[in-house]
Structures are given as C-alpha cells and as structure tokens.
Image: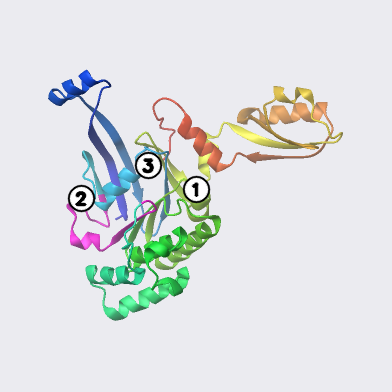
C-alpha cells in the first residue's frame, strides 16, 4: 500500500457573488446569488512511503486545499484519498498522531511563551513518554541549532528561528507523513539553506513521506526529485522534476561569444536577446530551431565560444502557470 493515494479528489466552494451598488446590495439581502468555485478538480496521484515530492502550482491552484484535505481539515466534495491507510476527513486519533502539517503562514506556537512551553504541551497532546520526549527534543534542537533560544519568548525570535521551532513542534511525535506548505516563505537566504539542509537530512534518516509546496524553486531543486504540478485545480504533470523543462519549455538559451566583440544586428531574427555583455550575448531561441540557428550563426559569424542550456526551472514554471485557458493534460503519469 502506498503512503498516500488520491483518486479523483474534488473540493467545491459555494461563494456569494456580491454585486456593486446600494440597490444591488439591498436586493442581495433577500435574493442572494452564488457561484461554484472548484478549488480542487479530479486530482489523482500516488506517493510511496519515504518519498519527498514537490507539489507545485500558482496561488489559487489548489495546493493548500489539497493539503488540508489530506490533513482532514477539509472534507472533499467528491473523490477518495487515503494516507497511511486512513481516510483523513474521518479524523481518527490514530491518524492524527501519524502526520504533521507545517505552514509558513500560520504558527502553532504560543506567541508570548518560550517555545519549550509549547513543546511540553505537544508532549501531553501526543502522550510522548518523558525519556523519548527529552531524547527527541535534544536531537532536534541540536540539528536545528536552537538550543540557546529555548527559553526566549517566541515573539522575540526572528522569522527563521520561529520556523525552526515550528519544525521541532511538528516532528516531536515523530510523524510518518509531513505536509510542508511554504515552509521557507519570507526567510532570508541563510535561514532557507538551514531549513533545506535539515529537511534533507531528517527525511533521509527517518524515511518519512513528505509533500512540499513552495514558490522557491531552490527549495524544490534542493529537496525533491519528483514533482506534481497542479494548475487551476488539476494535475498537469506528475513525474521527475527535471522532466518539467523538457516537457513545457518552448525555448533554449544560446550563450555566444563573437570573435570581433560585436553583436550582429541580425541576431534578433533567430530569437530574443536576453543579455548582452560584450563580447558575450545570451540568446533565447525556439527549442525546435536550435540546430538550424546554430548552423546559420556559425556559417555567418566567427564564434570563439558557445554553449546551449535549458531555461531555468523557475522561468519554465512561471510560463506554464501564466498560460491562458484550461489546463492541459500533457501526458504525465498519474
């Protein structure tokens, strides 16, 4: 049995549509109009035990709603899902003890108390034996380098320090599944790297199953080999992370160094000039025309150096999410 199995999961919301104007507002008191918003639409995927999978999508794509469904916080409109053999929205105590949800936009620690007091509350909630609690707490505080901060009120901690405390609170009861919703949002580069290094080490050591949502592609590239991409409530890709560029990028990048140190005025006929730093120039060309463009450029100009590279994953993802119209099934395995 897979750790997480999702089949045709849907979640709809009935939203009141308010019209502009005083008269329309008065009419709305007696005759309300609603519209149906599909936050998640026929989502299906399967995640094996011990996998760390990126769950990507633009704002409003349905990522957080999906995590709430798998956490049992929201009941689906239709569809099925099991996590560790449990149906999440049945909210069994035995399931609650086996997963954790960490979000960078919502805190679970008491603001005016030291983090260690919140940890003691977690010990009571999850009924962790004293010796196990102490051992786990020492291990996590050592790995995350926050031992000196344990007695300091949470409100006095930096954002990066608070996130590390949030991770400790989430992992104290040693869950088998961890849902991470934007864990590094707002963190500086140093704090992001510390969180990344910890998650990579902890997941490898404990073999826990992790679903990670993030808008920082550096998080995703550092931690995950597989990605599920969701757009407008539907899965549009499920497979290797590095396959996203191959499937969705329409261009490649040519890095050219001209012998005479000048950029030919005719270069724009091959594609878009992204950057010029004489004698080098970066040129974006259609993917299917790379060979033809290179052959023509080499025939017409003297080149000292050249390279061909893929567009950055972040750019490809942004382009995919900005495409108009309905999401398209590009043939990824589900």
Q: CA distance from mark 2 to mark 3?
A: 23 Å
Cβ–Cβ under 8 Å for marks 2 and 3: no
Q: Quadrant of the C terminus?
A: top left
Q: Of marks 3 and 1, which one's residue comes earlier in the chain? A: 1
Of badges 2 and 3, the one in the foreground is: 2
- Residue 133 versus residue 95 in the image, above or below: below
Identify the residue under disc 3: 334
Q: Is residue 270 left or right of residue 168?
A: right
Q: How many C-alpha atoms fall within 10 Å of the one at disc 3: few (<14), some, or many (≥20)?
A: some
Residue visible at 27% across and 52% down in the picture: 71
- Give residue 226's position: percent from left, percent from top: 46, 49
Is 265 on the left or on the right of 48, as rendered?
Answer: right
Q: Position of residue 13 (x, y in %)?
A: 24, 35
Residue 173 visible in rendering: no
Q: Position of residue 232 (x, y in %)?
A: 37, 33
Within 10 Å of disc 2 (Cα), the crowding (few <14, some 14-19, many 20+) is some
Disc 1 residue crowd, few under 14, some 14–19, many 20+, Cα 10 Å: some
Q: Could you say whether the residue bearing mark 3 is in a helix, strand or loop?
A: loop
**Which mark is in front, 3 or 1?**
1
Residue at numbered disc 1: 216
What SS does tag 2 mark? helix
Given residues 55 and 170, the one toward you in this image is 170
Report the residue that reaches farthest toward the front: 22
In this rendering, would 77 be left or right of 252?
Answer: left
Q: Which residues are magenta?
A: 82-105
Q: Which mark is residue 89?
A: 2
258 or 195: nearer the viewer: 195
In which quadrant of the rendered image does the N terminus lie? bottom left
Q: Secondary structure under badge 1?
A: loop
Q: Mark 2 vs mark 1: which is more N-terminal?
A: 2
């Amino acid at each position: 049995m897979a750790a997480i199995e999702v089949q045709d999961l849907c979640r709809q919301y009935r939203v009141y549509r308010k019209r502009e104007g005083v008269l329309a507002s008065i009419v709305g008191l007696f005759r309300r109009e609603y519209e149906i918003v599909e936050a998640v639409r026929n989502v299906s995927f399967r995640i094996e035990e011990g996998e760390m999978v990126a769950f990507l999508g633009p704002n409003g794509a349905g990522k957080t709603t999906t995590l709430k469904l798998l956490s049992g916080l929201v009941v689906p409109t239709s569809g099925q899902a099991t996590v560790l053999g449990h149906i999440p929205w049945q909210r069994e105590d035995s399931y609650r003890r086996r997963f954790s949800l960490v979000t960078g936009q919502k805190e679970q620690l008491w603001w005016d108390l030291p983090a260690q007091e919140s940890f003691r509350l977690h010990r009571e909630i999850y009924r962790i034996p004293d010796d196990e609690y102490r051992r786990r707490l020492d291990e996590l505080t050592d790995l995350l380098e926050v031992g000196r901060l344990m007695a300091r009120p949470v409100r006095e901690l930096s954002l990066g320090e608070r996130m590390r405390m949030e991770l400790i609170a989430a992992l104290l009861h040693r869950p088998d599944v961890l849902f991470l919703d934007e864990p590094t949002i707002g963190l500086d580069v140093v704090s992001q790297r510390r969180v990344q290094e910890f998650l990579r080490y902890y997941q490898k050591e404990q073999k826990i199953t992790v679903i990670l949502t993030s808008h920082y592609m550096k998080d995703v590239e550092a931690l995950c080999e597989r990605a599920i991409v969701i757009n407008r409530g539907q899965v549009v890709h499920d497979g290797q992370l590095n396959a996203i560029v191959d499937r969705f990028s329409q261009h490649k990048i040519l890095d050219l160094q001209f012998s005479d140190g000048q950029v030919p005025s005719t270069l724009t006929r091959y594609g878009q000039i992204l950057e010029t730093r004489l004698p080098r120039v970066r040129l974006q060309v259609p993917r299917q025309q790379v060979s033809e463009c290179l052959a023509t450029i080499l025939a017409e100009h003297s080149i000292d150096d050249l390279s061909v590279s893929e567009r950055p994953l972040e750019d490809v993802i942004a382009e995919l999410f900005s495409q108009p119209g309905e999401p398209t099934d590009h043939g990824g395995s589900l």
